[in-house]
Amino acid sequence: MPGSVRDLTLFVAVYEERSFTAAAERERATQSGVSQHIRKLEDTLGVRLFTRSKGQVQPTPAGDALYLKSIDILRLYDAAKKAVRGYGKGLEGQLVVGLMPTMTRSVLAPALARFVADNPNVAINVIEAYSATLTQQVRAAEIDFAIVPAFACPPGLSSRLFLRTPEVLVSNPSLGLAHGTPVRLAALSPVKLVLPGRPNTRRHTLETYCAANGVSIERLIELDAMLATLDLVARSEWMTVLPGVMMALDDGTQHRVNPLAEPPFWLDLVLIEPAQRTMTAPARSFLSQLEAEAQRLNRRWTGGVAAAAGTPPAPSGRGRGEKLTRRRPRRRPRPDAS
Amino acid sequence: MPGSVRDLTLFVAVYEERSFTAAAERERATQSGVSQHIRKLEDTLGVRLFTRSKGQVQPTPAGDALYLKSIDILRLYDAAKKAVRGYGKGLEGQLVVGLMPTMTRSVLAPALARFVADNPNVAINVIEAYSATLTQQVRAAEIDFAIVPAFACPPGLSSRLFLRTPEVLVSNPSLGLAHGTPVRLAALSPVKLVLPGRPNTRRHTLETYCAANGVSIERLIELDAMLATLDLVARSEWMTVLPGVMMALDDGTQHRVNPLAEPPFWLDLVLIEPAQRTMTAPARSFLSQLEAEAQRLNRRWTGGVAAAAGTPPAPSGRGRGEKLTRRRPRRRPRPDAS
DNA sequence: CAGAGGCGATTACAATTCCGGATGGCAGCG
DNA sequence: CGCTGCCATCCGGAATTGTAATCGCCTCTG
């Protein structure tokens, strides 16, 4: 009933060669096979496609019509085959990743572009959310892995340090800070800061830093919207503090970016994944791309000799790649929101 | 290697249903068969098209791409099938017909339109030429039949009367003749006539008529180009004489048409075909359409009571449908040119 | 007119593919 | 833990496809 592409190929060959035998050798088939294919076509369509009289094979009007359609179909078919073959390289599978705005602003795009180029047949789903949501989804094994700020690791999760990045002050260029140079926040005190809301542990961490280092906050706006925060800073005298890896590509025209100094202030990002299962190959591959890109961008702040000197050792003996799965904690600590 | 349309149909079904079993029953197949088809596709393409994990069938990016192409291919394929099936009705074969301008000006188009509508899969080739050429081609069995002026039938031809049509005077409307009324050519004498060249027997017949009926020819132009003749008559005071069936559709605005009277002047058209072979079914069918149309148009001149009165009996006992094949003549008479 | 040769149709048989039922693995669910 | 739904796989028979050989028709040629 449905007919094969071979039928059309042979038909087109006969049409163009005006000969069954010529078509047969062109298509590496026997004259007999070609004859049978054409006859099958004619039978199923109920139409003669060629007149084989006078020693000449001539297409009928129906043959002409079918030829015009056939070449389109075959061209499409071939294009489809080629296009789909292009997906053959690289890994295969699905990949669901949870990332905070910290990762999605600068790190994600290059890593993602490289990964899809290398692995076109992996179905990718990136979820941008705050760490509370992400942690929950990882524990439910809804996503392959997530990158979140370091926190007390709840059960069912496996985690390791992903990146240590400096916190940076982000301000309006008109405020006159020299882009990229370390800054002592206390020297600017009192400051007007845009900070995340109370549920976000980041808020507490930042306030603690300020209080401990003689930074008085003149005014404060709570914004849990990253795009709005950046826009507000770019258009006003409000400032904010963000993870450095997120701002590594800024050149100082939209935002002035200055690492906090005296004392430096570091943020640890950790990778979390469901403890009960091993990471899929696409997840591993994408993670390595992501990590490479994050470290490359982070060198904007740690690569310089002066900045490198200020890098503290990894905290509390937990090095990169070291698992810290906790199976049965006494109580479940609430994950912080970023 | 080349894959069948069934593959794509089943693939599309799976893609849309997101389920192998649902696709199977939608396409009247078994789940097993669907699974095998998809696997064959994946193997030949070297790409996974669906991820069958978590109890969910989800297309991969390659699956998405293939789906987009597939629906186009299937749509095209279906359209092609439907279109070609449309050629299934009616007769099939080839048809080569030779006609003079006398037939092609008014008779051919309606007959041809009806014939191709009824028999879409007949390859038609109409050759417009003068009778000398046509007779030769019929004898060489290059064409199925031709319509030519009556003449002494050479060997190898079978002929019968096709149509008796009155000769009509064609003139410029500004000359003031009443369109459609019989006219006595002698009353217009002397006349300025456009006539075919000497090789055409028509020329001799017309001159004979004029001479025998007191028509003096004031001036004469030889034109063997029908379009040019009609155009010249429409734009000047030159007149010509043409077979009536050719001018039956004219309404008198471009050309005034008047049957010759006192005496009337008839042209016999005959059908000629190769004697050694019987006419093909398409040829018979087309001929009957052509004949019906010719007679319909001819009634414009013979249908009226007065005109019918002037119709002479068929000449020399050769009625319509009567063959006059001559196998072995003494000498081969030169066919006249029309 | 006879013979040769080209070409498509047909036939018979072999290889392959297709199809459907049965079975097994896996995950979700009560 | 059994049940159920779903897909993969295996297997045997049916159908299709491909091949080689042959036939019939036509053309060409001498």
Image: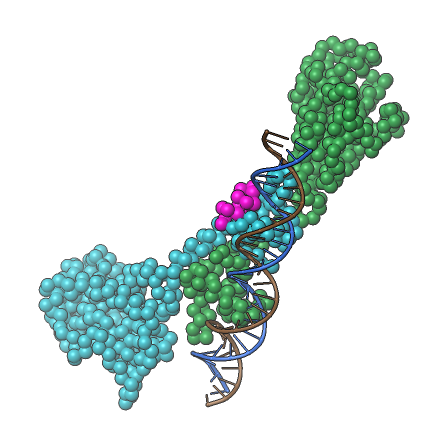
Chain colours: A cyan, B green, C blue, D brown
Residue A286: horizontal and vertical position, in percent?
Answer: 30, 66
Residue B131: horizontal and vertical position, in percent?
Answer: 71, 24
Indicate whether B160 appears above or below B26.
Answer: above
Comparing A263 with B336, the one in front is B336
Q: Residue at x 28, y 87 (%)?
A: A329
Q: In this view, does A80 lie to the left or right of C18?
A: left
Residue B15: horizontal and vertical position, in percent?
Answer: 49, 65
The total number of labels drawn is 0
Indicate whether B17 appears above or below A50.
Answer: below
Q: In this view, does A78 lie to the left or right of A231?
A: right
Q: Which residue is drawn at 70% across and 14% down?
A: B198
Q: Is residue A12 magenta?
A: yes
Q: Is residue A279 magenta?
A: no
Comparing A224 with B309, the one in front is B309
Q: Residue at x 74, y 28 (%)?
A: B156
Q: Residue at x 38, y 63 (%)?
A: A121
Indicate whether B295 appears above or below B53.
Answer: above
Residue B321, image quadrant: top right
Residue B262, image quadrant: top right
Q: What stretch is highlighted in magenta?
A: A11-28
Residue B244: horizontal and vertical position, in percent?
Answer: 77, 25
Query: Does the magenta stretch mainly form a helix, a strand or a loop?
Result: helix
